[in-house]
Amino acid sequence: MDYPTVYEALARRQQRILWTGLALVGIGILALIFPIATTWITQIYMGIVLVLTGAVSFYISRSLNEELSVFGAKLWSLMNVLAGGFLIFNHGVGAIIVTALVAISFALQGIYEILLAAALRKRAIWIWLLASGLISIALAIFIASGLPESSNVVLGILVGVNFVSSGVALLFLKRHLSRRLSA
């Protein structure tokens, strides 16, 4: 990553950073207040994404010419639709699956935030991004280590913590950008 380019791109998007940070903090607080509902919403959302992905993939597979490609694409599409439907209609087991997927997502988000912190390490804000990335990775490990017992409540709480920490990091980034550019 080219440091000046990343910093300049972020500086041009201060308002987006501010509103995204505020939204993440607000959603995170709601998730902490209603952890079981957050788990359920996360599971339903993942199910809908899988069903839609499967439906679109099936539609696209109709244009493939090779028999093996058509069969593989349609099989993959069907598996996505079935997996999505399973998540939508099987809340207990679905919560365990979604909890594992969220752990993976948090780990990837943490890696991204740590890489962004490394790209901005010459600026004071880098430490907040690093902290948020480390929190995301720690949450991923915590989620994965508590499966399956923790899936109904802990997932909602950890989603809330993750959203709040990411939102706070963005708000500090916005504050840093405003101070540096006005100086």
Image (tube, helix red, strand yellow):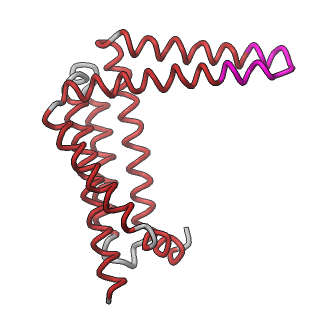
Q: Residue at x 22, y 25 (%)?
A: 37
Task: Say above or below: 142 vs 138.
Answer: above
Q: Report if residue 66 lies within the magenta region.
A: yes
Task: Say above or below: 17 vs 136.
Answer: below
Q: Residue at x 36, y 77 (%)?
A: 123
Q: Residue at x 86, y 20 (%)?
A: 65
User: Which residues fall within the magenta stretch?
Assistant: 57-71
Q: Nearer the viewer, residue 21 or 155?
A: 21
Q: Nearer the viewer, residue 171 or 75?
A: 171
Q: Position of residue 10 (x, y in %)?
A: 44, 69
The C terminus: image quadrant: bottom left
Q: Residue furthest right?
A: 65
Q: Position of residue 134 (x, y in %)?
A: 31, 53
Q: Nearer the viewer, residue 181 or 2?
A: 181
Left or right: where 170 falls relative to 60: left
Task: Say above or below: 87 vs 154.
Answer: above
